[in-house]
Image: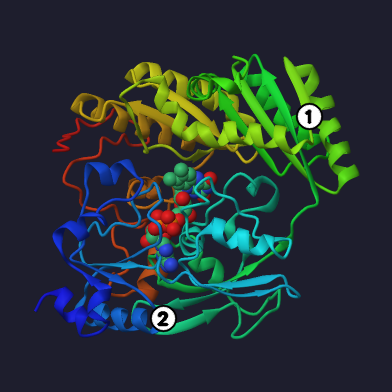
Amino acid sequence: MSIAADLRAIVKDSQVLDAPAELRTYAYDASFLTQLAPRSPDAVVIARSVSDISAVMRYASAHGVPVTPRGAASGQAAGAVALEGGIVLALNAMNRILEIDVANLQAFCEPGVVHATLNAALARHSLIFPPDPGSSRMATVGGMASTNAHGMRAVKYGPTSAWVLGLQVVLPDGQIVETGSVGSRAKQSSAGLELTKLIVGAEGTLGIVTRLRLKLIAIPPARAIVLGLFDALENAGEAVQAVFAAGVSPSAIEILDERCIQAVNLFRPAMALEPVEALVLFEVDGNVPGVRWDAERVCEVIGPLARKAEWSDEAARINALWEARALVGAAVGTLRPGSNRAYCGEDICVPVARIPETLRAIQDISARHRIPIATYGHIGGGGLHPGHLIDGRDPDEIQRVLLVADDIHQLALRMGGTTTGEHGVGAARAPYMAQEHGPALEVMRRIKAALDPKGIMNPGVIFDPPVLPFELPLRGPVGEPSAAIIDPG
Ligand SMILES: Cc1cc2nc3c(=O)[nH]c(=O)nc-3n(C[C@H](O)[C@H](O)[C@H](O)COP(=O)(O)OP(=O)(O)OC[C@H]3O[C@@H](n4cnc5c(N)ncnc54)[C@H](O)[C@@H]3O)c2cc1C
């Protein structure tokens, strides 16, 4: 019997997909790696309940079949694809908001609830779940928890892990457990090991998140935006440090480099952004007088470093500037008509003080490999998203962009940063984990082995690089790039 036939005896026939064309749609996520090496699973299960999931896991555990949980597949790290075959467990149909507990500032959700849908429902109670990824209209809360997503407002409100109070999790053997104290609605706890934090960011390698207890806050009543235009990247970096030193905690600090500004203007000429080396947006939120004080203070401290610094609390201006930021990911494609973005080496994070140096080094990498790169990111926390533009039909460019990604990952580590600030490790960055964590990786492997002794949960992600149909052109910490064999066909 096939895996799909076995699964049809466990869940409803309509919940199991195994037609090749259907499986193909599960062979990718938003990563470049899965564009190069798409991998169809043997079967997909559309999960409808925790008991479905528990039954599927009991079957998978008994037969040693790999299982890959999948939310919206907006992840850019090749984490939601069954790179070693087996079952993809699709969680996006489990998308009910189970309860909004206004008095206790908590929401209970199934894992497939889309982030923007949750916040639209919360807004009716003047509440918000603060993590705010650019993929808000796609990403599921289960995917966000599993990657510990950050987003623009993490600089003030922290990552998703700060907002998850408890989880229901199906373990690899099918057992259902609740983390964060059974039945608890407490906002604090010191009771034992923080299993919630262990599962958050585990990228589906330790179990499947089937329900989330999320912490909420009231929507801040006021916000304002400060636009800073800088002739030199170094001044932009100094300005961010000066703002923190002045005692202001902005709710977002975002940077667009020169190429991104050009791209936004090409994509939406009405934006008419001034051509400078760096544009930085500072958002402040809170109560009305506090917001005004903060915005004026930001202008005052960045003024001497900037060509222009201006603030506004008018909704139209705030929305227009955030739209420019939101557009940039798509707009960078206009810099090179016919090109596509290769999402690899797209998510580094470095110490804030080293951002200008890092941005200049990315420009050098771009020139060295002859691949245009436009960089934007969450500069307040050190997160940078280099956007590489390639002709995806040209094997030489594919080879070169993989070298670009490797150079960028190595750069991040050299700067004292990380290969991923918020998108996660997936399969794409698994080869760097030994270098990034040293002996701590072995500790992680032991935790993984304790919870998943058969190694069936999302193999190829985080702990051990997947077996790919080509060699990734990785440089070690020292030495030259290997002679990679790239055959994307
Ligand atoms: C345009 C765009 C903008 C983005 N902006 C941001 C941003 O600002 N900040 C940010 O952090 N990320 C961003 N991302 C990346 C991505 O959206 C996030 O990583 C998001 O959290 C993934 O959610 P998902 O539902 O798509 O998860 P998927 O991509 O489906 O899965 C991601 C990982 O989580 C695992 N997983 C998913 N659901 C579960 C579950 N219920 N239980 C256990 N494991 C699970 C999967 O196995 C996989 O390893 C962006 C992506 C795009 C395409």
- Taking the spot 43% from the left edge, 72% from the top edge, the residue there is 94
Which quadrant is the N terminus positioned in?
bottom left
Report the residue marked by disc 1: 311
Q: Is residue 119 left or right of residue 440?
A: right
- Looking at the image, is 414 positioned above or below residue 63? above
- Looking at the image, is 157 positioned above or below residue 126? above
Q: Position of residue 277 (x, y in %)?
A: 59, 17
CB under 8 Å between callouts 1 and 2? no
- Which image quarter: residue 69? bottom left
- Taking the spot 79% from the left edge, 17% from the top edge, the residue there is 304
Q: Amino acid at mark 1?
A: Trp
Residue placed most toward the observer, 3 or 361:
3
Q: Amino acid at mark 2?
A: Val
- Taking the spot 48% from the left edge, 24% from the top edge, the residue there is 267
- Looking at the image, is 485 positioned above or below residue 441? above
Does any portion of residue 40 appear in the rendered image?
A: no
| SS label for mark 2 | helix
Which quadrant is the C terminus positioned in?
top left
Q: Position of residue 409 (x, y in %)?
A: 42, 36
User: Badge 1: few (under 14), some or many (20 or more) residues near its Cα, within 10 Å?
Assistant: many
In the image, which disc is placed on residue 50?
2
Ligand 1 location (quadrant): bottom left
In the image, which disc is placed on residue 39?
none
Residue placed most toward the observer, 116 or 61:
116
Q: Position of residue 210 (x, y in %)?
A: 46, 74
Mark 1 vs 2, N-terminal side: 2
**Which residue sits furthest right?**
289
Q: Is residue 303 left or right of residue 275?
A: right
- Taking the spot 41% from the left edge, 81% from the top edge, the residue there is 50
The CA span between labels 1 and 2 is 49 Å
